[in-house]
Amino acid sequence: MAKVPMTTPLVEMDGDEMTRIIWALIKEKLLEPFIDLKTEYFDLGLEHRDETDDAVTVEAAEAIKRLGVGVKCATITPNAQRVEEYGLKEMWKSPNGTIRAILDGTVFRTPITVAGIEPTVRCWKRPITIARHAYGDVYRNAELRVDEPGTVELVYKKASGAEERVTVFEFSGPGVVQGMHNLDASIESFARSCFTYALDLKQDLWFATKDTISKTYDHRFKDIFQAIFDAEFAERFEAAGIEYFYTLIDDAVARVMRAEGGFIWACKNYDGDVMSDMVSSAAGSLAMMTSVLVSPDGYFEYEAAHGTVQRHYYKHLAGEETSTNSVATIFAWSGALRKRGELDGNEALREFANALERATLETIEAGEMTGDLARITTLPDPVTLSTSAFIDAVAATLAKKLA
Ligand code: NAP
Ligand code: MG
């Protein structure tokens, strides 16, 4: 069988621990036998990040700007314990944070749905994608304990010398106070990423804030979204047959619980933090969640939403058999390959990406899965496979499909 050709390479970012092992297995068993895989390889494994003083992460992000599409393995974000474990020169920043700072994107998380893994919310027939604005608000706040009576004001000292003040509260007893900010530029690029990805998926976009209560702060988000939609996206949405829908956050939550799914839900930073955990746990398992970084300039980076699955890796190092779910990492690859195919007009590559996803889901639907899914499936008599046996099973299904 002739291998599917590729023209432009993908930016490939290798990672750490159990997901690094899965990464190599996916390439060896699911990709290289079937496609003439072309990648620009960047080793974001923690040792190599340390050796290069983290320059490799920046180079990978620059490569995504050049080539348009990247696929990333989960990576360790160092903490004090990791600095000691790996003898690091420094507590390097989160690679995802570094890449996002360079590409200025929004992260979209979507559960992978499969028959036999039923969402806890019964009416959800299709996945709900959450987009979280990853800048500002309570995550970049300034806070104070108020310990005696007094007045708290917001003071805005303008560069021009003028001043604006507003009273937050006149305290007669102890309490707390907090100041938050956001930036038009950040909200604008969030809006553009959301509208761009809605067009990409051909799905409706929902956005919600609390603008009835927060008449300046939240209202600014609403106005910016609407202005960008009207000026840049309304016609393209109409042509694609999709809608932009704005509502209040409480109304959005109520509607989501009664919806069938199949749309993108754009959330402010805090709402996205909370709602993404709700959607992922209601959809089944963190191991079945993909994550796509979409930049306002239209660059795409695909990865699994979960981490490096450290606990399984230590079992693996101890020589024990593991049953780690590779589905989200497989879907990171299929997502990136499909996008590469689209951009290059490479129909065979797009078809391969679709076939890889179908083979993965059909393997599970036939009752062969990893332990995390076997524990929650509604299918009778599931067979629990090891990490590598599951990938072998997908390879066998895929080979049959492509024959
Ligand atoms: P994790 O790797 O997501 O795993 C947490 C637990 O979730 C696992 O112990 C496992 O539960 C379950 N799980 C997650 N993915 C699974 C999979 N594919 N198959 C089966 N079970 C899965 O989170 P963590 O252990 O807290 O973090 C480990 C490292 O990952 C950290 O160093 C962190 O910095 C990094 N991290 C990276 C990213 C990223 O690169 N995007 C994201 C998050 C975390 P059981 O142990 O009960 O089986
Ligand atoms: Mg959270």
Image: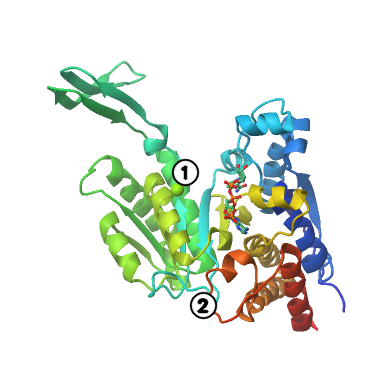
- Asked whether 119 or 69 is in front, the reply is 119
Which residue appears at 73% of the width and 58% of the height? 22
Which residue appears at 58% of the width and 68% of the height? 373
Which quadrant does the N terminus fall into?
Answer: bottom right
Q: Which residue corresponds to mark 1?
A: 134
Q: Give percent across and percent down for residue 70.
A: 68, 53
Q: Give percent across and percent down for residue 356.
A: 70, 72
Q: Hey, which residue is sitting farthest right in the picture?
A: 1
- Asked whether 329 or 315 is in front, the reply is 315
Q: Reply above or below: 148 against 314.
A: above
Is 148 placed left or right of 398 in the picture?
A: left
Which residue appears at 47% of the width and 43% of the height? 134
Dot 1 falls on a residue whose secondary structure is loop
Which of the 4 image quarters holds residue 174?
top left
Q: Reply above or below: 16 against 337.
A: above
Is label 1 within 8 A of ligand 2 (CB to nearest ligand atom)? no
Q: Which residue corresponds to mark 2?
A: 378
| Residue 9 visible in image | no
Q: Hey, which residue is sitting farthest left in the picture?
A: 172
Which residue appears at 40% of the width and 50% of the height? 274
Is label 2 within 8 A of ligand 1 (CB to nearest ligand atom)? no
Which of the 4 image quarters holds residue 155?
top left
Q: Amino acid at mark 2?
A: Thr
Q: Reply above or below: 100 against 196.
A: above
Q: Amino acid at mark 1?
A: Ala
Nearest to N terminus: mark 1 or mark 2 = 1
Is 18 placed left or right of 161 in the picture?
A: right
